[in-house]
Amino acid sequence: MRGTFFITTLAAAGLATALAAPAFADEIDDIFIAALEQEGIPFSTAGNAIELAGAVCEYAAAGQDKTQIALEIMEPAGWSPEQSGFFVGAATQSYCP
């Protein structure tokens, strides 16, 4: 009986952890998008902005510094240098390890 209770409790804890991770990711996404909106940075969709944020992390992991990344994404996104710099900063703080 005690073994069954332990296994049930362990399974419930594992399920709670698995469900919490996506909820935490959604919260980060929401905060990131809200920061972009508050700063007035235009983007086509939240999904595209989050995807670009992931690319920012890939560029950083490949050794590019934040200024290089901001310059690389600025023109295609149609952003000013300030907007691009803010985006890179917000992306790295929100998503990059």
Image: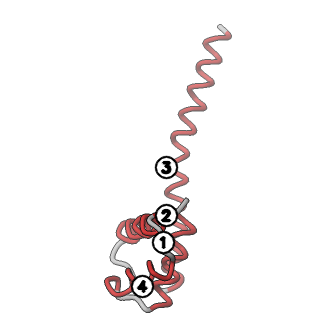
Residue 29 is marked as 2
Residue 42: x and y, percent? 40, 83
The mark that comes first in sequence, 2 or 3, is 3
Q: What is the three-letter code of the residue carrying label 2? A: Asp
Residue in the image at 49% along x and 49% along y: 22
Q: CA distance from mark 2 to mark 3?
A: 10 Å
- Badge 3, how many Cα within 10 Å: few under 14, some, many 20+? few
Helix, strand or loop under label 1:
helix
Amino acid, disc 3: Pro
Is 27 located above or below residue 85 in the figure? Answer: above
60 horizontally vs 10: left or right: left
The residue at which mark 3 appears reads as 22
Residue under label 1, please give it: 33
Disc 1 residue crowd, few under 14, some 14–19, many 20+, Cα 10 Å:
many
Q: Secondary structure at mark 3?
A: helix
Q: Residue furthest right?
A: 2
The kind of secondary structure element at disc 2 is helix
Q: Nearer the viewer, residue 5 or 71?
A: 71
Task: Name the amino acid, label 1.
Answer: Ile
Q: For the residue labelled by badge 4, is the local secondary structure a helix, a strand or a loop?
A: helix
Q: Nearer the viewer, mark 3 or mark 4?
A: 4
Work out which quarter of the rendered image holds the N terminus and state it. Answer: top right
Q: Are marks 1 and 2 in contact (CB under 8 Å)?
A: yes
Q: Which residue is mark 4?
A: 71
